[in-house]
Image (spheres, rainbow, N blue to C red):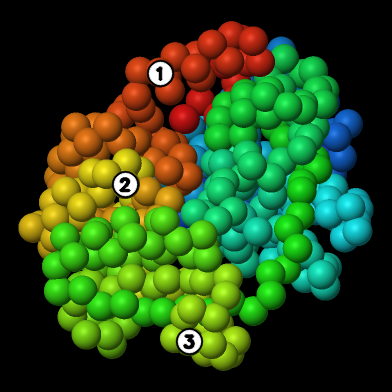
Amino acid sequence: MKKLQESFGNVNFSDKDYEKAAYSSDASQIDGKLDAVVWPTSIEKVHELVNYCRRLKINLNVRGGGTSLSGGCTPTGGIVVDMAKMNRIIEVNEEERYAITEAGVVLDELNRKMKKSFFPVIPGSRKACTIGGMVATNASGLKTREYGKMEDWVEELEVVDGTGRYLKIKGKAIKNFCGAEGSTGIVVRAKLRLAQKPRQRTLSILKFNTITAMMEKIEELEKNENVKNLIFIDEICSELLDFDERNHLVVEYDNDDGNIQEEDESNTVWNMLENLRHIVIQQRLPRVEDPCIPLTDMGRFLYWLKKRNIPSYGPVGAGTVYTFFQKDSREIEEMYKTVRKLNGRISYSHGLGILKKNYAAKEEAAKIIALKQIHDPELIMNKGV
């Protein structure tokens, strides 16, 4: 890799052991292996890197903020491509509500640039996750019932694919890269739609002794056009938050129907929910899953979790909850089978990564294989996923 080192220089290339150790894993805590780390600073450098690796059949492992919980950027040999230095916010237009950024821009930094608008897809890792990484996993957040996923807010992508082609992607083709976990190319720039900051919202926190009673209430709330978000908290997570040991439902309204009407108090609730993931992980439950279940079968799934004392919470109104396990729990595979039986998907927006790729649905696997034939026939892009 001497030629690559000469081209990128010592500042933007490293094969030192301590650098390789730092980049050998992501938030999934899976150990990988790599030969070097490269920090591109321009589209031209990304193009040069891809062509170099394509000729020599070297694997490229693209990395954003390293926040993947499924091993999406755990390297499997070759080069880790850290996009952190491509972090320019090129344009923010609040009047027309769009922003153009490079892939390495951190979400919180983008939102701090705006007063009247914001980018509304906000994962729990917002302080570290990058726009490129969010595109790669088709990220979502707690308010996904209202705002959807990353693919709903991307207007245009600029990509260098595995053949070395520079592409501008619009329309339906965005889905060929949004959610592909870096397996079809490297996102270098994105044009994003922005949302207007909403007027003050109100919240209610409802308590339920049974899952059946809660699901009946959810069915009722789903018909209320003023309800924007529904967050479920199970008995285990409720206790960790010093709530009653019952099932809770946080309901967000866009009018005054909620019991919590003060903005500061509402912000406290959202901050608590954002921190809940870390609180549960600290209970020696580092494996976080995000299955997606049709709302009609969500009650059955929540009963399945309750019977096994598996902690869970999340945006149930969007058909997903976060579930927590010990690192090598056998119950994870059992859950995947249960999700399939309920016509669900094993991941909503965390991606499949190394951890779940062997459990991908046939149609998901077939789609990636077809896209790889077009955009990465040499199979150098994120081999692990």
Badge 2: few (under 14), some or many (20 or more) residues near its Cα, within 10 Å?
some
Q: In which image quadrant can residue 240 be found? A: bottom left
Q: In the structure shown, which secondary structural element does the residue marked by tag 3 occupy?
A: loop
| Front position in the image: 335 or 146 | 146
Q: Amino acid at mark 2?
A: Leu
Horizontal and vertical percent for residue 351?
46, 40
Q: Is 60 left or right of 112, judged from the image as shown?
A: left
| Front position in the image: 30 or 8 | 30
| Front position in the image: 95 or 59 | 95
Horizontal and vertical percent for residue 228?
52, 63
Q: Residue furthest left?
A: 307
Q: Amino acid at mark 3?
A: Ile
Name the residue carrying label 1: 363
Q: In the structure shown, which secondary structural element does the residue marked by tag 1 occupy?
A: helix
Q: In the structure shown, which secondary structural element does the residue marked by tag 2 occupy?
A: helix
Horizontal and vertical percent for residue 154?
71, 41
Badge 3: few (under 14), some or many (20 or more) residues near its Cα, within 10 Å?
some
Badge 1: few (under 14), some or many (20 or more) residues near its Cα, within 10 Å?
few
Q: Amino acid at mark 1?
A: Glu
Find the distance from the CA under tag 2 to the CA under tag 1.
22 Å
Find the distance from the CA under tag 2 to the CA under tag 3.
26 Å
Q: Is 173 left or right of 112, judged from the image as shown?
A: left
Q: Is 371 left or right of 97, judged from the image as shown?
A: left
Vertical comparison of 140 with 346: above or below? below
The label on residue 260 is 3
Name the residue carrying label 2: 295
Q: Residue at x 42, y 71 (%)?
A: 251
Residue 102 appears anywhere in the view: no
Q: Earlier in the sequence, mark 1 or mark 3?
A: 3
